[in-house]
């Protein structure tokens, strides 16, 4: 009789991530993860003493996935800032369960806007923007905050099925917000 396949911690996290992606993080529990892995709940509980720990690990994986998604721009038409803003909104449209898990769950609490912008996970995004915009990293952060808040509003409404995705309209609004933010930062540095 062949040995049973070993369920690794990574496999458990991957299954929880997929559940969050397909049906929402609220459906992550030992039984649903075990079912996804076609095993008993024992391997799930072996690797994670609590479901809170497992959800935190799935959240971290979703956060990495989201960062990669933001940086994967098909074309630079309109620039890096616009591309990242559009990708943020597209993510909400294409991955509404993950978007809600990342930005509208208790796992996102306890982070201020300033803590978020200084997070290590955001560094590649800010560096890409700085390369495109120029200026100091502090100036880029100011522009980013404006674009983020604007894009987050659109994305939240879309992820919660309250607004249809209209890329041209969104693009024109993002461009205006970007121009306004950039102009404001220039005025402040004079």
Image (cartoon, rainbow, N blue to C red):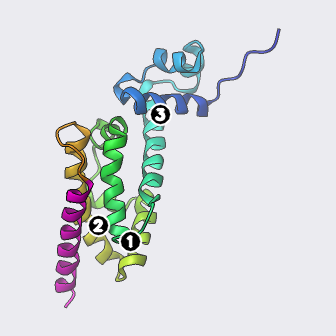
**Viewer-nearest residue: 120 or 66:** 66
**Viewer-nearest residue: 134 or 141:** 134
Picture coordinates of residue 16, whole percent (x, y): 48, 29
Q: Is residue 135 above or below residue 78?
A: below
Q: How many callouts does the rendering have?
A: 3
* Mark 1 vs 3, N-terminal side: 3
The residue lying at 43 percent from left, 77 percent from top is 131
**Callouts 1 and 3 close, C-beta under 8 Å:** no
Q: Determine crowd level at label 1: few under 14, some 14-19, many 20+ residues with C-alpha closer than 10 A.
A: many
* Left or right of residue 96: residue 186: left
Q: Quadrant of residue 146?
A: bottom left
The residue lying at 42 percent from left, 24 percent from top is 28
Q: Which residue was labeled with disc 3? A: 17
Furthest residue toward bottom: 190
Q: Report the magenta stretch's main SS.
A: helix
The residue lying at 23 percent from left, 51 percent from top is 166
**Callouts 2 and 1 close, C-beta under 8 Å:** yes
In three-dimensional space, the C-alpha distance between marks 1 and 3, rounded to whole angstroms, equals 28 Å
Give the residues drawn in magenta, as a range: 167-190
Quick one: SS at disc 3? helix
Furthest residue toward right: 1
Q: Quadrant of residue 107?
A: top left
* Mark 3 vs 2, N-terminal side: 3
* Mark 2 vs 1, N-terminal side: 1
Q: Please tell me whether residue 186 belongs to the stretch shown in magenta.
A: yes
Q: Is residue 36 above or below residue 155?
A: above
Picture coordinates of residue 48, whole percent (x, y): 52, 26
Quick one: SS at disc 1? helix
**Callouts 3 and 2 close, C-beta under 8 Å:** no
Q: Determine crowd level at label 2: few under 14, some 14-19, many 20+ residues with C-alpha closer than 10 A.
A: many
Q: Which residue was labeled with disc 1? A: 129
Q: Which residue was labeled with disc 2? A: 144
């Amino acid at each position: 009789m062949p040995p049973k396949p070993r369920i690794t911690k990574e496999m458990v996290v991957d299954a929880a991530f997929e559940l969050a992606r397909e049906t929402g993080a609220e459906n992550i529990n030992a039984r649903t993860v075990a079912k996804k892995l076609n095993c008993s709940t024992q391997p799930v509980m072996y690797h994670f003493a609590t479901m809170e720990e497992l959800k935190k690990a799935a959240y971290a994986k979703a956060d990495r996935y989201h960062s990669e998604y933001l940086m994967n721009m098909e074309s630079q038409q309109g620039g890096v800032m616009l591309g990242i803003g559009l990708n943020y909104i597209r993510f909400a449209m294409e991955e509404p369960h993950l978007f809600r898990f990342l930005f509208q769950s208790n796992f996102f609490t306890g982070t201020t806007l300033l803590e978020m912008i200084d997070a290590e996970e955001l560094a590649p995004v800010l560096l890409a923007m700085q390369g495109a915009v120029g200026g100091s990293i502090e100036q880029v952060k100011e522009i980013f905050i404006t674009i983020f808040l604007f894009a987050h509003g659109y994305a939240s409404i879309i992820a919660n099925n309250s607004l249809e995705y209209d890329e041209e309209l969104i693009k024109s609004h993002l461009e205006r917000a970007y121009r306004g933010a950039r102009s404001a930062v220039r005025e402040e540095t004079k």
